[in-house]
Every structure is written in structure tokens, then in C-alpha cells.
Image (spheres, grey):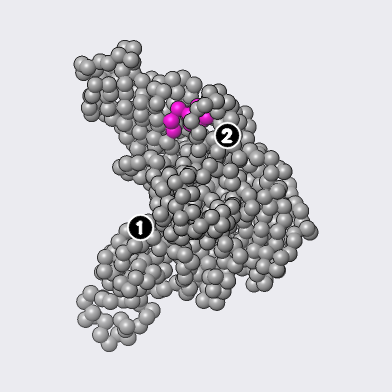
Amino acid sequence: MSYNDTDIAALITPTMIHRRVYTDPLVFDLEMQRIWGKAWIFIGHESQVPKPGDYTTQTIGRTPVVMVRDKQNDVHVLYNRCGHKGAKLVDKSCGTVGGGFRCCYHGWTYRLDGKLLGVPHMAGYEGTGFDKEDPQYSMQRLERYDTHRGFVFASMDADAPDLRTWLGGAGDVLDNLCDRSPEGEVEVAGGILRYEHDCNWKMFLENLNDTMHPMIVHRSVVDAANSYMATLPANSPRRDEAEIIPPFGASYENFEATGITGFRYGHHYDGGKSSIHADYTVDPDYEAVMLKAYGKDRTQEILTFNTHNTLYYPSLTIKSAVQNIRIVRPLAVDKCVVESWSFRLKGAPDSMLQRTILYSRLINSNGSMVGPDDLTAYFRMQQGLQSQANDWVEMHRNYGSDEDHGDRLTNVGTSDLDMRSQYAAWRHYMLGEAA
Amino acid sequence: MSTDTKKPDIRDIETFLYDEASLLDRPDLDKWIEMYTDDGTYWMPAIEDQEDPLNHISIYYDDRVLMEIRRRNFVHPRAASKDYKVRCSHIISNVRIESITDDELLVTSNFQCVMYYNNKQTLYAGKYTHKLVAVNGGFKIRHKRVDLINCDGVLGTIIIYI
Ligand code: FES
Ligand SMILES: [Fe+2]
């Protein structure tokens, strides 16, 4: 079948999602055009391209793009496609092209902002109507790109709202991540892990603030950590693992109390006043540089704004309190890649990056004892939803009691407010409904 | 701990590496952990020539504490990802002694590991680096480094040590 707007609208009710939203390749194709082709998508961070000619590559849906710094120090997001016959100009995840791009096929060259510079052996083009100065033969710029505190986003929709409007109140968490640096700046550090997921991309997003799962899915690692730690003598040295793993087994009441806050365009976070990261020991050296930079009250304010997971729908998820992010890249209706990145807080002691790295390794790595259990649940949903026994997935929890604060909705941490926010955005992008 | 200064027999080292691999073939983590010293570590870097497990992400970097947690997690009846049988077949070759110091042997080898997990068979390949210490006429592992040839590629779940 094909989908008209009425068919698409019938896939989502305020409390139910049709299984085809997760399983139908035609829905996936429409999502790539209408969601990934319109929303602001996280591309990278300016710290990844410190010098002119430095670049990183990404994809938006199926579209390859390149982020590059030009000679005026401006960062551009360009379509990674040669203006001649379409070859990708660069094919590594990051690197440098020096003064400009040069296509591997027929050697067309481009300025760092994408403008076509040279075409070898122009003779044959005389009188053919081909005009090298015609912008259609240059590398094309994304319709929109902009940065917020070094985070680079791009959109293929010329009519997208400006980035700051789109981030809305959820931008507070991105700001908090940067404010946790005594210099107010972060940089990408410590490498990127790429983890293939055999599931629909939305399952990963819907799990971020699903606080009804950790005590079930992560019980095994919590039990294992607690039972081993209990065998250690009381005066054993403190281990960061002992602070990071056990909160995944926090109670329903605990998660309920942390709250969920939802925003326009599908963004949301859980926590705020508190989260499962709230009780980490604060490194005294870190506290000292923060106090020096910000004073007591502001330091307190920054460190107690404690969220767990924040989603900038559909591509970027951050944990500001541990300075890592995960981004999702859909590949097919039942396949996506989740990338884990770490950030260094500029001016903070090395121990902070080391904790971030440890956290990613313990929780996000493909060899960890946490991520693989989440993925098993997604994989089983992907399989189970092939069943025709029941066409619907439900998201009723605390429906009807979301509190409206104007720019945001709030509810208890165990509510399905996060999913309802995501599907309001899904309908906005897929059907043009108000955000 | 006794120290053996004369060059050890390469066949003894090979046998030791095979013994370790066969514990991972099953896998039997209880016995496997016993092959490590108390300060033993297991490292699977995420990039080629990675120098640092602390300031750069790794796929695995476990000391005894994490090995102990992992051993318990691996047999926990509620770990969904462990609901599936894990069976491996390790082949080790090109075993070389790279250096011998007073109390440590540096041994490198190539490996291929076919892992069966969740209805899928996956081939992992790469290079092992073992730091071995001589203990009571045998060896223990002070450090094992596993460099996958696709360490920086897109990888699925790696459910158990390789
Ligand atoms: S395709 Fe790039 S120069 Fe021909
Ligand atoms: Fe989880």
C-alpha cells in the first residue's frame, strides 16, 4: 500500500501507536523525507574541525553531508556530493582536505564553502551551454545550518524555525552541559563508539526516558555489582562503578519523583532537580575550579540542574551530568546505528573526562553490561511487532494529567509524557500539524 | 612468585594461550578469571594503536573488579542479553615472544574467533598481546590486549570477552 495523509494520521492516536510505524519500510521512507528531511539534525561540534580544511562527515537520513571549516573560520554544512556526476567528495568520518575539496573521479575542485573552482580540460565545454559559474555545479549548502555553543545542527527545510526557537526550553540542558566547564566550553574528546542496533530507530529514543524499564532490564548488572561489592572489605577504595551502576536499579517511586518535562518539537528530559546521576561524588579539584570561575551560588545552580537523558528529537540525546551524548542514525526500518561521544569540560581536571569515558564504557559500549540488555528488548519488540495479534502499542501512562506550563508540559517521571511528546512531533513533521 | 629468567619454551606459552582460549570457547568465566593476576586487566581498544584506556573510549577495559561483576552478570537468570547461548571457537596462531624482562613476558599472537550468539555467527579477528608473569612453574596473565581489525568500525553487541 501507499500512504496518504489520512492513512498516516490513522497510525497514531493520543495514546496508541500502530505497529506499522515500527515495521513498515514505506513508513520509514516517509519518515526519512518528512522528519529527517525537515527537523534540525545534529551534525557535529565545532571543536572537531579546529583548522580550515578540517571536516567531519555524517548522514541525514540517507543523505551524506560534510561539516567543514573554511578559510574565514566559518563552519559550513554541505551536501557531500560532487556537482559533476555525484561522487561523494570525502568518505572518511573525519579528516582534512587542506585548501579545498578535490573529487576523486574527474578532479573537479571546490572551495571550502562549496563553490566550484576548477574543471579540468574546459575545452570540450565551449558552446555547450555548460556554465562553470552556475551555482548548480557547486557543492550545495544545506538549506539551513547554525550552531548553539559549538553544537552544529543542519536542516534540509528552508522554512525550518530558527535553531534557538526549535531548541526552546530544552536548550537549557545543552547550556548546562557547557556551563559545567569552568570556561563555559566543551570539546569532543576520547573517541566515538558506533553500535549497530537491529531495531527501528524510534525504539532507542522511546527508551531514553522510559523509566519503567531500568529496574527490570538492568536488574542483572545491578545485582552483580552489588553482590560483588558486598564481598569487599568496608574500607576498600571508592569505585566510580559503585556510583554509576546501582542507580540503574532505582525504585519506581524514585524515578516517578524525578519527573519528565516535554517541549515542542518532541524534545524532553527526565530529572531536573534530581536524576540517577545526582549522587556522584564531586571531585574536589573540579569543584575548586568551578567555584573560582562561577562563585558559590552559580556553581551550585549549575551542578544541581541534574537531568538524566535529554532528547532533541530526532537525532541527538545528551547526558549533561556525565558529558556524553548518543546520536541515532536510521539505516532501515529495522536497523540503526547509535554513536556514543564524550566531551571534555575545558578547564576541568582530567578526572572529569575519565569519568565520562568510564560511564560510556560501562553503560553505552557494545561490550557493556547495560546497552546490550536494552538492545535485546528493542530487538524483541521489532520481532514481536511482526505479529498480527494486536496492531497497537500503548502509551497511556498518566495520560490526561500532563501539567501545561506554557512552553512545556510536565508529569511524573514514570509517565509516558516523553512518548506522547515524540508522537506530537511525529505528527507535526509527517502531517504538518502545529508543533 | 618465582621468576624464570631463562627463555621459556614457546610450546609452553602456546599451550597456556590455548588453555585460556578454550575457557572462552565454552565460556567458563569462573575459571578464566583465575588465569589473571590480582592486578590483571583485559583491554579491547576502540581504535588502532590506542595508547590510553582511561582518556579514550574502549570497547572493554576491565580490571578484576569488573571481571567479577561480569562473571556474576553473565549467569544472572534475568539478564535478557544472556538468554541466548554463547559458543565460540578461537584459533590462535603466529605466537611470538616479543620481549622478556625480569618478571614479565610480552607475547603476541593472531587470533580468529567465530562466535555464535542469538542465532547469528560472527567472525572476529585480530591480534592478541599478552603480558604474562611466571607463577609457580606456570603463567598468569597480567594484561591482555585484544586489537580487533575492525575495532573502529560499526560493531554489534560483543557479549563476551574474545
Ligand atoms: S564525479 Fe566528481 S569530478 Fe566527476
Ligand atoms: Fe536501559
Q: In this view, does A225 lie above or below A247?
A: above
Secondary structure of the residue carrying numbered label 1? strand
Question: Which residue is at the front of the view, A146 or A172?
Answer: A172
Compared across the picture, whether A335 is left or right of A98 comes to: right
Asked if residue A99 shows in the view, the reply is: yes
Q: Name the residue under label 1.
A: A94
Instruction: Locate residue A291, reporting x and y percent.
Output: 49, 54
What's drawn in magenta, residue-wise?
B62-75
Instruction: Locate residue B36, reporting x and y percent.
Output: 40, 23
Q: Is residue A282 above or below residue A114?
A: above
**Same subunit: marks 1 and 2:** yes
Q: Give the tally of numbered discs.
A: 2
The chain containing the residue under callout 2 comes to A
Q: For the residue carrying disc 1, how many other residues have a C-alpha within 10 Å: few (<14), some (14-19), or many (20+)?
A: some
Three-letter residue code for mark 2: Val
Pointers 1 and 2 in contact (C-beta within 8 Å): no
Question: Which residue is at the front of the view, A240 or A386?
Answer: A240
From mark 1 to mark 2, how far is it between C-alphas? 35 Å
Instruction: Locate residue A6, reporting x and y percent.
Output: 70, 68
Q: Which residue is drawn at 68% across and 52% down?
A: A259
Q: Residue at x 64, y 72 (%)?
A: A432
Instruction: Locate residue A139, reporting x and y percent.
Output: 37, 73
Q: Quadrant of residue B132?
A: top left
Q: Name the residue under label 2.
A: A221
